[in-house]
Amino acid sequence: MKKETKIRYNTINIDNVKYKTFLTKKFKNRKPYKKPELNIIKSFISGTIRNIYVKEGDKIKSGDKLVVLEAMKMRNDITAMTDGIVKKINVKDGENIIKGQVIVEIDA
């Protein structure tokens, strides 16, 4: 005799319409969305810092070049996402960094 397993459905409400669905373990264990912090600049890829254009205490505007990050033989200009004053530079020229490492902190 086969043992019946009961499937547990969840309800999702999208635009005031309820949908019955099955949520996987992977979906339930995902990292929740976190709004990005505009005053903390993090590396988006592992690489090497080639140039640092700012110093601590410099006034910057949105779009100003902060550093050059070289990854996979490509140079990426890391720019400011907000106006402010450079609070702290957490890297040195020539330093190897990993993905997600804080590069520059801005006091908005």
Image (cartoon, grey):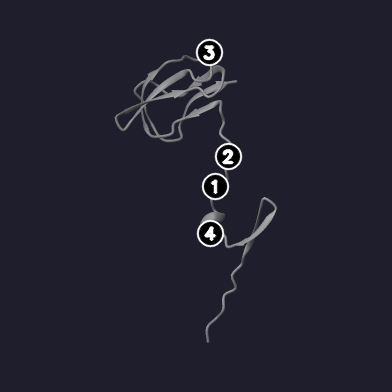
Using residue 53 as the reference point, say whether residue 83 is left or right of it: right
The structure residue drawn at horizontal position 56% and vertical position 55%, both measured from the top left corner, is 28
Q: Are marks 3 and 4 in contact (CB under 8 Å)?
A: no
The structure residue drawn at horizontal position 49% and vertical position 20%, both measured from the top left corner, is 63
**Dot 4: element:** helix
Using residue 16 as the reference point, say whether residue 94 is left or right of it: left
Q: Please name the residue that numbered disc 3 is placed on.
A: 57
Inspect the image, locate mark 1, and give the three-letter code of the amino acid beneath it: Lys
Using residue 89 as the reference point, say whether residue 19 is left or right of it: right
Inspect the image, locate mark 2, and give the three-letter code of the amino acid beneath it: Lys
Q: Are marks 1 and 2 in contact (CB under 8 Å)?
A: yes
x%, y% of residue 44?
43, 34
**Upstream in the sequence, badge 1 or badge 4?**
4
Q: Please name the residue that numbered disc 1 is placed on.
A: 31
Q: Please name the residue that numbered disc 2 is placed on.
A: 34
Inspect the image, locate mark 4, and give the three-letter code of the amino acid beneath it: Lys
Q: CA distance from mark 2 to mark 4?
A: 20 Å
**Dot 1: element:** loop
Inspect the image, locate mark 3, and give the three-letter code of the amino acid beneath it: Gly
Q: Relative to the observer, which residue lies in front, 80 or 58?
A: 80
**Dot 3: element:** loop
Q: Please name the residue that numbered disc 4 is placed on.
A: 25
x%, y% of residue 7?
59, 70
Q: Are marks 1 and 4 in contact (CB under 8 Å)?
A: no
**Upstream in the sequence, badge 2 or badge 3?**
2
Farthest residue to the right: give it: 16
Q: Are marks 1 and 3 in contact (CB under 8 Å)?
A: no
Mark 4 crowd level (few <14, some 14–19, many ≥20, 10 Å Cα)? few
Residue 25, relative to residue 15: is it above or below? below
Mark 2 crowd level (few <14, some 14–19, many ≥20, 10 Å Cα)? few
Q: Are marks 2 and 4 in contact (CB under 8 Å)?
A: no
x%, y% of residue 56?
50, 15
